[in-house]
């Protein structure tokens, strides 16, 4: 089951999606049992920004059919707080650490990459490019030319592998993946959440404090599979597939679509050990393409 | 220690009983190997079967409940059917299974040398029952909407009751009873749980008198262990996650209960 990803030797192909697991908080709840049975083969941090962010006002969650909307707003301590307080604790995890960063422009992202690059505890860097461009309102990762420019700005600032977390809220995700590859990315990961909205049941306003939110969970699984398949056909760098993964079968589907790793996100909310089960189920699915067991039951 | 660690991962537990108490249900779940929780801590619950495909194709996420009490390896939870999640849990029968995660969060601090005074409203009386079990003796004031809900008072010992419509006990809010008690002047620690407007009244009454108050708050949660950052409440020091920094917060840390 070991798998090679950007030069890292991982025990199995299941990692976490950024922002879906706080290993430091989980250790407060479960103690060192978390480390003994750590569910992921690499750990992706929540998004770190240059300056601290409080996040969005509540409510931040809305349960949907087969999933949920979140409008969390990337709360974090900022780069300095992360490096000083969080990184030493995350370094105690038994797996390689991938630090996810977001900046509002290429200069910010390049600075973040350079500062994170200095730390040996970090095995790889993931770029969150779902930040809106203040001029266009589009996510900086939604426009291929802009994404390539951002990646070219980051590339010379770090020798560590760089993973670009693609946004699904774009016209052509394969073109975005090619732009990331052209800019020097070592891998891409997808899908991030799909933009969605809910209205307050009684009052004339939106439910989420942030206005809109990101849809995740089983509801987005077919979208994830389609986008992962489109991207793996378009690039030659490895792909991390995610979106509604709750079983080994779902993980296997993404691997069959060409992904090298899969990530579990929202399912971990329902069970903090879900990814261990997904990895175990995946390991029992031998020769999935020939077994015939993947036909959808009537 | 007001935080007991949870076993890592959700576990399947058998429902042993589901009894009506007025308009509420008390769900009993066998958890013989689980740890003894601390009053004010909570669990995430989901039905093992048919969790989904209810109203609006929900529920999907587990639901957070403070435990009512733990007796002989059985956890008791007080439920009120207010949506697709609680609806499904309320219909569970003995022999069915639930997914259980917990105990989670930080519970109540002990009262020290002061007199503990427990003040609850509606389904929020649940964690106060666990606290009363733990303390032995503690004075209890409870508020309910009406006669249908007032039987919830029987889940604690020797409670004085207020109802909004006056059908049982004091006609008015439980905070009317609390104000009288506080004005008696004894050194008191107030423990409160209930709907936000009640908790805000309790907080304000205590703040005005300089009385120590601990509030067990509620928020929608996706995970219960700090992963989703969805359950934040505003404190004087900014947002905190109720699941890992609460659900019990010091009243003094809050500007107001929103």
Image (tube, rainbow, N blue to C red):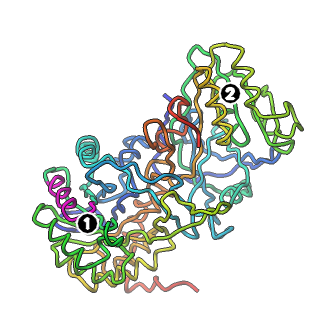
The residue to which callout 2 is attached is B118
- Chain letter for mark 1: A
Total marks drawn? Answer: 2
User: Local crowd at mark 2 within 10 Å, few (<14), some, or many (≥20)?
Assistant: many
Most foreground residue, A259 or A148? A148
Q: Is residue B9 left or right of residue B111?
A: left
Lateral position of residue B108 relative to residue B83, left or right: left
The percent coordinates of residue B238 (x first, y second) are 43, 41
* Residue ID at (57%, 52%): B220
Residue A117: x, y in percent? 15, 55
Residue shown at 65%/31% (left/top)?
Answer: B202
The chain letter for the residue carrying disc 2 is B
Quarter that holds the C terminus of chain A? bottom right
Q: Position of residue A137 (x, y in %)?
A: 36, 70
* Residue located beneath label 1 in the image: A2
Residue B24 to residue A265: above or below:
above
Q: Quadrant of the N terminus of chain A?
A: bottom left
The residues colored magenta run A103-117
| Residue found at x 30% / y 58% | A44
At x 44% / y 74%, what residue is drawn? Answer: A249
Image quarter of residue A161: bottom left
Report the residue that reaches farthest toward the front: A135
Task: Choose between B2 and A207: the one closer to the eye.
Answer: A207
In this rendered view, identify the residue nearer to me: B132 or A211: A211
**Label at residue A16:** none
């Amino acid at each position: 089951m070991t798998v090679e990803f950007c030069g890292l030797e991982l025990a199995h192909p299941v990692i976490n999606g950024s922002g879906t697991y706080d290993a430091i908080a989980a250790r407060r709840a479960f103690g060192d049992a978390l480390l003994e049975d750590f569910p992921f083969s690499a750990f992706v941090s929540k998004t770190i920004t240059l300056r601290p962010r409080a996040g969005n006002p509540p409510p931040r969650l809305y349960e949907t059919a087969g999933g949920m909307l979140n409008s969390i707003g990337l709360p974090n301590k900022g780069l300095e707080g992360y490096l000083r307080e969080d990184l030493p604790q995350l370094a105690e995890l038994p797996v390689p650490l991938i630090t996810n960063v977001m900046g509002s422009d290429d200069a910010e992202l390049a600075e973040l990459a350079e500062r994170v690059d200095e730390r040996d505890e970090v095995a790889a860097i993931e770029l969150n490019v779902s930040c809106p461009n203040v001029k266009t309102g589009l996510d900086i990762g939604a426009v291929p030319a802009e994404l390539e420019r951002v990646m070219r700005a980051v590339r010379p600032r770090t020798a560590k592998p760089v993973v670009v977390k693609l946004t699904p809220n774009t016209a052509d995700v394969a073109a975005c993946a090619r732009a990331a590859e052209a800019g020097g990315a070592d891998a891409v990961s997808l899908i991030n959440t799909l933009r969605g909205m809910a209205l307050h049941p009684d009052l004339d306003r939106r439910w989420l404090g942030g206005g809109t939110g990101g849809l995740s969970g089983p509801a987005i699984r077919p979208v994830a599979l389609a986008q992962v398949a489109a991207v793996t056909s378009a690039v030659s760098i490895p792909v991390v597939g995610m979106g509604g993964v709750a079983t080994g079968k779902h993980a296997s589907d993404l691997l069959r679509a060409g992904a090298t790793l899969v990530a579990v996100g929202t399912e971990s909310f329902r069970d903090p050990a879900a990814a261990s089960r997904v990895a175990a189920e995946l390991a029992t699915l031998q020769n999935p393409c020939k077994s015939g067991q993947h036909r959808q039951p009537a | 220690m007001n935080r007991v660690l949870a076993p890592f991962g959700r576990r399947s537990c058998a429902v042993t009983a589901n009894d009506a108490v007025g308009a509420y249900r008390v769900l009993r779940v066998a958890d013989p190997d689980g740890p003894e929780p601390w009053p004010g801590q909570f669990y995430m619950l989901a039905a093992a079967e048919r969790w989904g495909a209810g109203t609006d194709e929900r529920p999907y996420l587990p639901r957070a409940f403070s435990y009512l009490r733990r007796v002989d390896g059985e956890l008791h939870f007080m439920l009120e059917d207010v949506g697709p999640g609680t609806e499904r849990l309320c219909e569970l029968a003995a022999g069915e299974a639930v997914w259980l995660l917990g105990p989670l969060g930080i519970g109540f601090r002990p009262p020290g040398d002061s007199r503990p005074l427990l003040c609850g409203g509606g389904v929020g009386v649940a964690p106060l029952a666990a606290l009363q079990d733990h303390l032995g003796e503690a004075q209890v004031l409870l508020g309910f909407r009406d006669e249908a809900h007032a039987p919830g008072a029987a889940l604690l010992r020797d409670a004085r009751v207020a109802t909004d419509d006056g059908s049982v006990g004091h006609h008015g809010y439980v905070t009317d009873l609390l104000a009288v008690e506080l004005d008696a002047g004894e050194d008191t620690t107030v423990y409160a749980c209930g709907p936000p407007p009640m908790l805000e009244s309790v907080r304000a009454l205590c703040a005005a008198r300089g009385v120590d108050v601990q509030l067990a708050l509620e928020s929608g949660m996706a995970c219960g262990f700090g992963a989703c950052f969805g359950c934040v409440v505003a404190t004087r020091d900014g947002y905190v996650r109720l699941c890992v920094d609460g659900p019990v917060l010091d009243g003094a840390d809050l500007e107001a209960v929103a």
